[in-house]
């Protein structure tokens, strides 16, 4: 609460100072507006990247560390101020990007014990119960859809817990030597010190990522999306006939069904556009027959498998754990390719909105 008031108070002060300096121009309405903002600060607060200055001011305050956990890290090395700008060019991480991250994290984290943890206490940070990591060993790094799941070794009471991670739009991981704090890296939201002398940093400028410790397999309360996730697209559980039957029952645009996560896990805007282009199905199509559904089923697997092999698509603000980006961007056929000729028929690709998402498709060879 203290932190929220501090954060919001700055914004209100900036907005209100000019108005108060010229009361004769605005009168009681401004006073009433300022009073409203002071009593309802969330009107002004939207999830947006904070500047390094804001972050440092906030991090120097006492964090919301539960009592009884090991030593707190209230002194944080100043951020370099040269971090990458927030925002993204190629969308948010999807299954291939998350799988690439998993493959790099797994050998580094599996078997490591967490000896201390710090996390951002900002009210919009989707971080919870991370104090439960302290003293626990991360047994593996698994993936479910776009989530990373790290089972923890059983505690003294035999309770089974899992660390759930989601990259959101801009999340990434870095390892730094523990004594260097955040190593000059900006927008660090979680820092977990490991028993090998390194710290794992979760960097997330836009704060849409998640890190939560939950009872193993019990996701409904904290991450309901994970609780209702459909089958893994590259597993046998993703059955073509079941997929076709589900599409046949639906009259929603096919792209909306793909993004929904309940029909199939891990497909987002990039790979929905790519799979629909490959299957020659228009993203807004509301009737997908059995044979076309089978083609789409195969196309989803094809585009995801290829993207995993290329370690995902390049993001301006997304970095893999080793600081590199994926190579899939140069292979995109539809996503982000509006006005370029379709590589199949030469017709310029068009951009439209489907399921409230920017969508690129070929008006000639992708049919309703
Ligand atoms: Zn075409």
Image (spheres, rainbow, N blue to C red):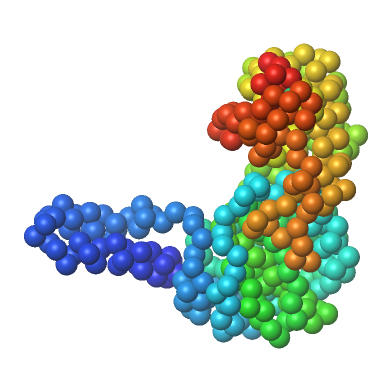
Instruction: Please provide percent x and percent y for residue 76.
Output: 58, 81
Q: Which residue is drawn at the image coordinates 50% and 80% (left, top)?
A: 60
Q: Position of residue 45 (x, y in %)?
A: 41, 56
Q: Quadrant of the C terminus?
A: top right
- Image point (75%, 40%), residue name: 332
Report whether residue 163 is seen.
no
Can residue 344 be spotted in the picture?
Answer: yes
The quadrant where residue 270 appears = top right
Q: Is residue 300 left or right of residue 50?
A: right
Q: Check the picture and name the quadrant holding the N terminus.
A: bottom left
Number of numbered discs overlaid on the protein picture: 0
* Residue 141, position as x, y percentages in the image: 83, 58
Q: Which image quarter has ligand 1?
A: top right
The residue at 68%/57% (across/down) is 318
The answer to which image quadrant residue 26 occupies is: bottom left
Most foreground residue, 312 or 159: 312
The percent position of residue 55, horizontal first and vertical second, equals 51, 71
> Residue lying farthest right?
236
Residue 254 found in image quarter: top right
Rendered residue at 84%/21% (across/down): 294
Depicted 69 relative to depicted 368: above or below: below
């Amino acid at each position: 609460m203290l932190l929220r008031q501090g954060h919001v108070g700055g914004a209100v002060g900036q907005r209100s100072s000019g108005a108060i300096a010229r009361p004769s121009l605005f009168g009681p309405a401004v006073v009433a507006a300022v009073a409203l903002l002071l009593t309802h600060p969330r009107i002004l607060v939207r999830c947006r990247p904070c500047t390094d200055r804001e972050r440092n001011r906030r991090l120097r305050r006492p964090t919301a560390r539960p009592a009884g956990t090991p030593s707190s890290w209230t002194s944080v090395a100043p951020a370099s101020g040269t971090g990458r700008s927030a925002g993204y060019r190629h969308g948010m991480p999807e299954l291939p990007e998350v799988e690439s991250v998993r493959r790099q994290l797994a050998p580094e984290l599996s078997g490591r014990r967490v000896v201390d943890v710090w996390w951002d206490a900002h009210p919009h940070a989707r971080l919870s119960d991370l104090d439960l990591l302290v003293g626990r060993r991360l047994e593996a790094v698994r993936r479910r859809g776009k989530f990373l799941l790290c089972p923890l070794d059983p505690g003294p009471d035999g309770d089974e817990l899992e660390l759930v991670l989601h990259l959101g739009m801009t999340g990434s991981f870095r390892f730094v030597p523990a004594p260097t704090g955040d190593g000059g890296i900006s927008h660090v939201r979680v820092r977990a010190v490991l028993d090998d002398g390194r710290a794992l940093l979760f960097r997330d400028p836009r704060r849409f990522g998640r890190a939560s410790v939950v009872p193993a397999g019990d996701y409904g309360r904290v991450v309901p999306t994970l609780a209702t996730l459909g089958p893994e697209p590259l597993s046998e559980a993703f059955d073509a006939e079941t997929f076709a039957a589900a599409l046949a029952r639906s009259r929603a645009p096919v792209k909306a069904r793909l993004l929904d996560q309940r029909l199939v896990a891990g497909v987002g805007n990039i790979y929905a556009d790519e799979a629909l282009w490959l299957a020659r199905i228009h993203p807004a199509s509301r009737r997908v027959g059995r044979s076309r559904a089978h083609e789409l089923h195969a196309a989803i697997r094809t585009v995801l498998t290829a993207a995993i092999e290329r370690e995902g698509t390049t993001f301006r603000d997304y970095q893999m754990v080793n600081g590199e980006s994926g190579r899939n961007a140069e292979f995109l056929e539809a996503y982000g390719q509006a006005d370029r000729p379709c590589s199949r028929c030469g017709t310029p690709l068009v951009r439209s909105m489907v399921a409230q998402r920017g969508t690129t498709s070929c008006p000639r060879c992708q049919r309703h």
